[in-house]
Image (tube, rainbow, N blue to C red):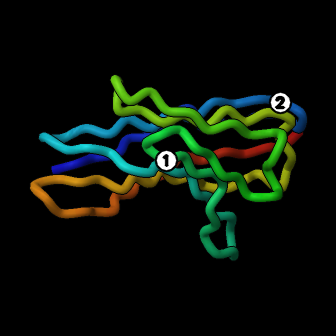
Amino acid sequence: QVQLVESGGGLVQPGGSLRLSCVVSGGAFSINAMGWYRQAPGKQREEVARITSGGSTNYADSVKGRFTISRDNAKNTVYLQMSSLKPEDTAVYYCNAGVTQFGSWYNYWGQGTQVTVSS
């Protein structure tokens, strides 16, 4: 069973930084695109950043220039470096991965990690 486990969330002051990590584990598989999403209270889940297996990246306009997504394929891990954090970045952040396993494609989600930006 493929699992995604996020870590790195917490409380940070405005202007601060955090780095989220997400490790994919569980059996034989290959990871395609990976991404980070977030959901604030009362709002829909939105895509924050995405990275393909080849390393191409895409960002939401609201985080461009402040967040950086990267991946370590050897460790089956995706990262989200968040800088210049704002109160409006407060949300539960979810890791997402498209995985090919036994010839089929699956979409997996992590359990989420809370990021709170507040003074």
What residue is pinned by disc 2?
A: 16
The structure residue drawn at horizontal position 60% and vertical position 55%, both measured from the top left corner, is 92
Q: Is residue 56 left or right of residue 117?
A: left
Q: In the picture, which quadrant includes the C terminus?
A: top right
Mark earlier in primary sequence (1, 2): 2
- The answer to which image quadrant residue 28 occupies is top left
The structure residue drawn at horizontal position 41% and vertical position 32%, both measured from the top left corner, is 77
Question: SS of the residue at dot 2?
Answer: loop
Q: Label 2: how many residues lie within 10 Å, few (<14), some (14-19) or many (20+)?
A: some
Q: Is residue 17 visible?
A: yes
The amino acid type of the residue labelled 1 equals Thr
The amino acid type of the residue labelled 2 equals Gly
**What is the x, y in percent for residue 73?**
38, 30
The structure residue drawn at horizontal position 86% and vertical position 35%, both measured from the top left corner, is 84
Question: Where is 10 relative to 114, above or below?
Answer: above
**What is the x, y in percent for residue 39?**
63, 64
Q: Is residue 92 left or right of residue 85?
A: left
Q: Which mark is residue 105?
A: none
What residue is pinned by disc 1?
A: 52
Q: CA distance from mark 1 to mark 2?
A: 27 Å
Q: Is residue 44 left or right of residue 104?
A: right
User: Which residue in the rendered view is the most extreme toward the left?
Assistant: 102
Question: Where is 86 relative to 108, above or below?
Answer: above
Q: Is residue 110 visible?
A: no
Q: Is residue 115 left or right of residue 2?
A: right
- Nearer the camera: disc 1 or disc 2: 1
